[in-house]
Image (cartoon, grey):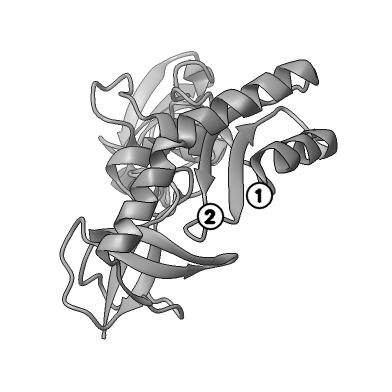
């Protein structure tokens, strides 16, 4: 039994499923979800054993499954138009991002972003009555919205959240601090989603290893030329810049620390 990476909802991270079938990339399959079976698309096959899942692929998608899925995909624009209209009428502070009809046709899912909590009870009642389906409203974050919309970062490459399918790690200001770029300001280290750039996670651990055993900026050191204050630490060159008590600046290497 192998593991495969499957995309079901465009606004969610792809999921890993156990697989007993001969599959290849872009194959359409049926997978179990919280509210019933859904059609998914295989993104990657034969994942490493470390990426385990307790859920198994139900079966391959049939021609009928694909026909129904494509039919509902074509109805998406009409759903979005209807929802946008009702959101505007209700003056709700929410942005509708996507919509999807479940494979069994019984449920319509509307995905949105909002700055806070939104009372969408009346919206659900209206949509349920007009569409003759159960309605599920799902709020997502700005990172998920960026993945859904796609685009290119300031590096000129496709957004990391799109290029590398899978779970997005938690990006923290500590990652920027350890790479000594936090001083650039949030505008310069934030992505299109307005959150800290995902790529901050790529080299954070290497920087932590390089900085191990090196003093903090503004700490006091005893050097061969006297006591001084650390004013700069260069992780890549392994050098420390120190301002001595007499006002002189010197650079010392990590291995020369007492």
Q: Residues within 10 Å of mark 2 (few under 14, many from 20)?
A: few
Viewer can see residue 133: yes
Q: Residue at the spot x=69%, y=29% of the render?
A: 114
142 left or right of 122? left
* Quadrant holding the N terminus: bottom left
Q: Position of residue 62 (x, y in %)?
A: 28, 67
Residue beneath the point at 33% across and 25% down? 151
Secondary element at image label 1: loop
Nearest to the observer: residue 193 or residue 140 = 140
Q: Is residue 197 visible?
A: no
Give the number of the disc on residue 105.
2
Q: Nearer the viewer, residue 200 or 34?
A: 34
Out of 45 and 77, give the one closest to the viewer. 77
Q: CA distance from mark 1 to mark 2?
A: 8 Å
Of 216 and 102, the residue lying toward us: 102
Q: Residue at position x 38%, y 53% from top?
A: 68
Considering only vertical position in the picture, is 56 above or below 129? below
Disc on res. 124 = none
Q: Position of residue 53 (x, y in %)?
A: 42, 76
Name the mark on residue 133.
1
Q: Are marks 1 and 2 in contact (CB under 8 Å)?
A: yes
Crowdedness near tag 1: few (<14), some (14–19) or many (≥20) residues, C-alpha within 10 Å = some
């Amino acid at each position: 039994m192998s593991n495969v990476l499957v995309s079901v909802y465009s606004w969610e991270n792809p999921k890993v499923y156990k697989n007993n079938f001969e599959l290849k990339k872009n194959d359409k399959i049926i997978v179990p979800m919280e509210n019933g079976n859904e059609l998914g698309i295989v993104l990657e096959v034969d994942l490493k054993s470390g990426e385990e899942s307790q859920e198994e692929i139900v079966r391959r998608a049939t021609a009928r499954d694909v026909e129904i899925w494509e039919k509902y995909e074509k109805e998406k624009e009409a759903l979005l138009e209807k929802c946008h209209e009702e959101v505007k009428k209700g003056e709700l502070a929410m942005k509708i991002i996507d919509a999807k009809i479940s494979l069994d046709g019984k449920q319509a899912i509307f995905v949105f972003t909002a700055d806070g909590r939104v009372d969408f009870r009346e919206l659900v009642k209206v949509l349920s009555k007009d569409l003759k389906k159960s309605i599920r409203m799902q709020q997502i974050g700005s990172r998920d919205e960026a993945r859904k919309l796609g685009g290119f970062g300031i590096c000129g490459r496709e957004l990391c959240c799109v290029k590398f399918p899978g779970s997005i790690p938690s990006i923290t200001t500590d990652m920027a601090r350890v790479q000594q770029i936090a001083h650039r300001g949030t505008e310069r280290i934030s992505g299109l989603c307005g959150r800290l750039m995902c790529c901050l996670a790529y080299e954070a651990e290497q920087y932590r290893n390089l900085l191990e055993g090196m003093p903090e900026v503004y700490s006091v050191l005893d050097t061969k030329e006297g006591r001084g204050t650390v004013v700069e630490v260069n992780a890549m060159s392994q050098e420390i810049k120190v301002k001595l008590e007499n006002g002189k600046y010197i650079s010392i290497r990590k291995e020369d620390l007492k």
